[in-house]
Image: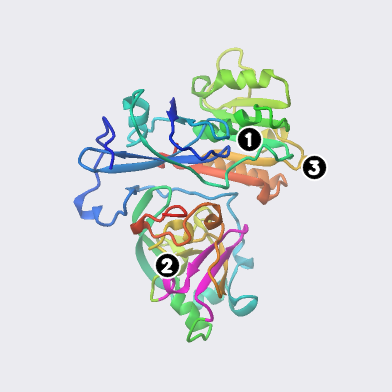
């Protein structure tokens, strides 16, 4: 896992949740492209941060996480995707549910919320394999310590360290009911993670009575190399 | 073209298939799932497919009636705008030509179609891109009923365009007089979506 900040030229600004396309070109002209979610807050700042998980056997993520050095120039296009986004002007409570590196676009939303623009109630339910796999752990703790209406719930699926205070199982219906907003609060829900995680969570949210149109999803597959 | 320092890439696709992979795509053996919301789970008993001209119903088939239409089996390569390409996928369903024939249409009422799906998804297509065997409504993948996460009970399949045009959970094909953007086409994606011309986003 590596967070990389790119200094862009003529960045048009982005919404929280959008992504960029990165295109790499070998000296014989061979090219490879992939999409990565933006981690930095919404806005027009020319510095755009991505957090990239190295997919073993992947083509672009190993380059970004292991080979890329400060000062290199990269072909980056964006922002892309106008649906899996959060508008800080929205008054609906914000329910974010992340599996693994699916937390990246949701982090952009939380960072955007932490700017003065919005203080709608927000919750992040974040499933990781182990405590070491949690991305942005310290920053999330700091955001939660602000006590400004943001609640953080971690769950670990492959064992927890001594003294762990979070959840210790896969996200299930009970956990969603317990950690989420009430139906009457009409939260906007964004779910991002591996395909099987998102499928399960989205189905359970629907079964709890949340409206399908209030649930936005972004899935990535085992070989998808997305983000 | 700017060379990226230190990038070699896998360059692993065999010569035999390289010509089948559009620019900017890579080959995967998986079948990724990309959907903007929850998977739709429509019971077969309440499924039907309608053909309309604007608000006027031209034909409608329930599952049994759809299964009784001429069935076609075809193998296609799929190209998703998120960069993956999947080669040699095997499908069964009814060609758009056979749907027109079954509806008793000898010509099409308009030049464009909007596909409407369970869950509210839409995508727009020129009629010419659906005719002459270029598009099907499919119910089976690789010999088995199409799983819900891949669009079952039935999805549109327009394999020569990026896969967002092959709408999952399709229920209505509505002819329209003028072209209009569907869901992704309204959100920055290309109005037509030809992978060989790399028409990913508006303006490409």
Chain ID of residue with mark 2: B
Q: Is residue B190 left or right of residue A71?
A: right
Residue under numbered circle 2? B92
Where does the image place residue B190, in percent across and percent down from the top left?
46, 57
Residue B144, horizontal then vertical, whole percent: 44, 60
Q: Quadrant of the N terminus of chain B?
A: top left
Identify the secondary structure beneath mark 1. strand
Magenta segment, which residues?
B109-131
Label 3: few (<14), some (14–19) or many (≥20) C-alpha neighbours in 10 Å:
few
Residue found at x 49% / y 31%? A46
Q: Is residue B129 magenta?
A: yes
Q: Label 3 to label 1, Cα distance in Å?
A: 17 Å
Marks 3 & 1, CB-CB < 8 Å contact:
no
Q: Which residue is rendered at x = 26% and y = 39% of the image?
A: B10
Q: Is residue A226 left or right of residue A137?
A: left
The residue singled out by tag 3 in the image is: A184
Left or right side of B179 for A149: right
Residue A89 position within the rendered picture, expressed as x and y whole percent measured from the top left: 70, 39
Earlier in the chain: of badge 3 and badge 1, it is: 1
Q: SS class of the residue under badge 2? A: strand
Q: Chain under label 1?
A: A
Q: Secondary structure at mark 3?
A: helix
């Amino acid at each position: 896992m590596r967070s990389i900040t790119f200094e862009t030229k003529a960045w048009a600004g982005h919404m929280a949740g959008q992504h960029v396309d990165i295109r790499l070109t070998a000296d014989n002209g061979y090219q490879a492209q992939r999409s990565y979610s933006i981690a930095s807050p919404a806005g027009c700042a020319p510095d755009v941060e991505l957090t990239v998980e190295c997919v073993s056997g992947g083509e672009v993520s190993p380059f970004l996480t292991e080979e890329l050095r400060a000062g290199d120039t990269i072909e980056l296009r964006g922002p892309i995707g106008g649906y899996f986004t959060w508008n800080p002007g929205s008054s609906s409570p914000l329910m974010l549910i992340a599996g693994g590196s699916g937390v990246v676009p949701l982090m952009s939303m939380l960072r955007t919320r932490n700017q003065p623009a919005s203080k709608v109630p927000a919750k992040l339910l974040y499933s990781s394999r182990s405590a070491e796999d949690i991305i942005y752990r310290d920053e999330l703790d700091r955001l939660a310590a602000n006590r400004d209406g943001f609640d953080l719930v971690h769950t670990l699926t492959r064992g927890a360290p001594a003294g762990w205070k979070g959840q210790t199982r896969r996200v299930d219906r009970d956990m969603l009911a317990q950690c989420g907003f009430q139906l009457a609060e009409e939260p906007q829900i964004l779910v991002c993670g591996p395909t099987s995680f998102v499928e399960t969570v989205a189905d359970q949210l629907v079964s709890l009575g949340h409206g399908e149109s209030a649930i936005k999803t972004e899935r990535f597959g085992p070989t998808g190399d997305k983000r | 073209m700017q060379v990226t320092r230190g990038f070699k890439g896998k360059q692993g696709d065999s010569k035999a298939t390289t010509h089948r992979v559009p620019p900017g795509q890579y080959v995967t053996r998986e079948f990724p799932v990309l959907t903007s919301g929850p998977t739709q789970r429509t019971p077969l008993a309440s499924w039907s497919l309608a053909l309309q001209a604007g608000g006027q119903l031209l034909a409608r088939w329930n599952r049994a009636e759809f299964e009784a239409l001429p069935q076609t089996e075809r193998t296609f390569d799929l190209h998703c705008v998120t960069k993956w390409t999947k080669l040699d996928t095997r499908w069964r369903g009814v060609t758009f030509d056979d749907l027109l024939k079954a509806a008793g249409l000898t010509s099409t009422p308009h030049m464009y179609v909007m596909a409407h799906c369970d869950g509210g998804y839409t995508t727009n297509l020129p009629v010419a891109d659906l005719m002459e065997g270029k598009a099907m409504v499919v119910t089976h993948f690789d010999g088995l009923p199409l799983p819900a996460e891949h669009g079952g009970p039935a999805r549109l399949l327009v394999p020569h365009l990026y896969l967002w045009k092959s709408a999952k959970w399709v229920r209505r094909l509505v002819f329209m007089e003028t072209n209009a953007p569907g869901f992704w086409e309204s959100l920055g994606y290309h109005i037509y979506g030809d992978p060989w011309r790399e028409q990913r986003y508006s303006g490409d």
